[in-house]
Image (cartoon, coloured by chain):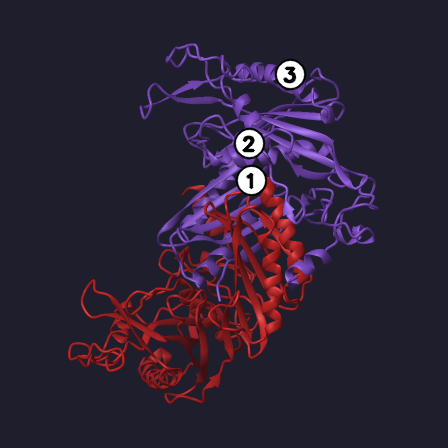
Chain colours: A purple, B red
Amino acid sequence: MNLGKKLVLGLAVLTTGLSLAACGNLNNSNIQKTDSTTGKQNKKSTYQVTGQASGSQYAGTIKNGHYVTSTSRGLTAGQNGNINNVKSFENGLQSISKPVFAPSKYVFQEGQNLSSDTVQKWLDRKSKDNPEGLNPKDNGSKSPTKRNPIYLQAMEEQDYMEKSGNKLKIKGMTIGLAMNSVDYYRKEQYGAQFETKISDADIKAQAKIMAQTVLARLRQRSQLKDIPIAIGIYKQASNDSLTGGNYLMYSVNKGASLSSWKTMDYQNYVLPEKNGESVPNSNDASAFENFKDQIQSFFPNLSGVTAQAQYKGKTMQGMKVNITTQFYSETEINSFTQFVNEQAQKFLPSGVNIDITIQSTEGVQSFLTKNANEKSYYSHIFTSY
Amino acid sequence: MNLGKKLVLGLAVLTTGLSLAACGNLNNSNIQKTDSTTGKQNKKSTYQVTGQASGSQYAGTIKNGHYVTSTSRGLTAGQNGNINNVKSFENGLQSISKPVFAPSKYVFQEGQNLSSDTVQKWLDRKSKDNPEGLNPKDNGSKSPTKRNPIYLQAMEEQDYMEKSGNKLKIKGMTIGLAMNSVDYYRKEQYGAQFETKISDADIKAQAKIMAQTVLARLRQRSQLKDIPIAIGIYKQASNDSLTGGNYLMYSVNKGASLSSWKTMDYQNYVLPEKNGESVPNSNDASAFENFKDQIQSFFPNLSGVTAQAQYKGKTMQGMKVNITTQFYSETEINSFTQFVNEQAQKFLPSGVNIDITIQSTEGVQSFLTKNANEKSYYSHIFTSY
């Protein structure tokens, strides 16, 4: 047994004798490994959690030293052409889960109930060979407006666990359905790409039908029969968007029939404004322009300055600013980061979360961040010995 | 005048009536623009600084709204094959400067005295056409041991400024000489690469001669005649090193003859240890191995885990850990970052600066950092709307 292994066993491991459910803190240091009384550690699965849970972050599940990855991770109906969609779909689903399954009470586990095969079948079109397909049959048309588009692009399962005996037991689930706002297709292999646009009304109508089908199928599985299952409907941004999409609505369901839907009023925008797409608050746009002007005049050759801004109704919730520069020297990046810090405090909205990333072709050079309730930015410069 | 311009002028600008030299704080808000009394703002240069100076960070120089970039930035004798050298050469030079020219008192300016032409001539070999060359004449030999290698690979000038009247005046300078430990050369164009290894003794001997020459040349310039000039001698790491090199020694000079040299006892190492190159403290190496074992078993397919470690004598000063993973989902990166945080606190040395960067082919996913005097890590996950 090498030193590494010994230390693994020395880690606090999540097994019998541990009450996870009621405490507001899943700190590993409170978790005791009790298998030593039986000596049968090789026959039982041992669970750990990834870290300390807080009110805002879930602890994740580790089984026998390995993280429990999703059984159907990353499956999509065709290629997902906008990485922002993937990221915001996953993050947003956890945001929906947090008020339903409190991070202080539940342990997060990547989806383990829907296998890769199952999800692939559900994402495919319905057909004689694939009766479980949630997307509509191919009606033979190649016309953008007459064909049946692929409505459902991706699915994600997230499991919320509690300790039961010496196991983690599933106590809640959240399902995300990522719906296309644009379905990209080809009339022939390697041919030109065409688009079928899908209205919000169609997205919602189709998503509700699919959500009902998914819910009914999940309820047929014995361990998912009685747990709360939340379902979130995500609208994918188009492939040329510089942001991901947004969740339109969600429902939390106790039975096999869908409960009522709650609307989610988040929208993502890109700054600076382009093509007449304006953000809900024009002050934010002009403040960003001022910030951008300052930043862009700093170096002789600068620099892309763009931002993703998230709004709830007319109120900005946060920004992710991306500054791309040439490769500059360490001292230049130091000075630039200081300068960006000052200008951000001066021009960018206060009271919202803001991340600013400064990168060159060499990768991320530095970044700055502040939470909604902070005034000044934390900054970090990536260096090398 | 657009709004951006107006706000530039509204910025506190560094001109007359301002005492920079004595105060320990260069906060822009203390700096007043006084040209408004003359109305001649277009004829005079206006200076700003990049941000608030602290005991540990310089404020940089902005002139007429633009950062004052170096007049000879990035020049090297031939290509520099190890980006870590570039970064640590620049950062290290500022570390040498800080005790000599206190950041609270001096404003940092990228080197403005040595032009690109001058530096290029100095870096080239001495020849009939280039009498100023600091590198030795080509003796015609192509033999690794008989040829005259390129000793001096790069030069860097950093200026330390104080306010004088309504200008910034140079009050101190630091020069870095980056010396090759290996000189890479080709016997014919596009031919195979050969190496001439250069001993530490040769590096030091050559660097001392060059430093004396550089110092004497600088003293001939009227505004550099009387200021303190620090000179640091940097030894470049080889191109295949995963760290940059290190400063061997420095001197702070008042006159035209070199003062005594002070040895700098920093060394960079790579972890895990390879090819029998062991770090000065074997406990650090085994602690890192334990950390690495934990991290590598987390995901089914992981993950490079390496680190740069800096030592002063036998004592570690800091680590920069680099973890490369596949592209994982947002929830996986969340959980992984939590886990890395726990393992780092458990295994990595306390009492030193540690940065941990987690990246995939998509770029940086998250990072963690702590200062020497902190126990817990700050962590940040890069997300997208």
* Residue named by callout 1: B329
Q: Residue A141 location, x and y as percent?
A: 39, 10
- For the residue pair A56 and A41, the one nearer the viewer reads as A41
How far is disc 2 from disc 1 in space, using C-alphas? 32 Å
Which of the 4 quarters of the picture holds residue A233?
top right
Whether the residues at callouts 1 and 3 have beta carbons within 8 Å, the answer is no
The 10 Å Cα crowd at callout 2, few under 14, some 14 to 19, many 20 or more, is few
- For the residue pair A295 and B207, the one nearer the viewer reads as B207
Q: Are marks 3 and 2 on the same chain?
A: yes
Which element is circle 2 on?
Answer: loop
* Residue named by callout 3: A212
The residue drawn where x is 40% and y is 10% is A140
Relative vertical location of residue B123 with respect to residue B14 in this rendering, above or below: below
Q: Is residue B146 left or right of residue A329?
A: left
Whether the residues at callouts 2 and 1 have beta carbons within 8 Å, the answer is no
Please give the chain letter of the residue carrying mark 1: B
Which element is circle 1 on?
Answer: loop
Please give the chain letter of the residue carrying mark 2: A
Q: Amino acid at mark 2?
A: Asn
The 10 Å Cα crowd at callout 1, few under 14, some 14 to 19, many 20 or more, is some
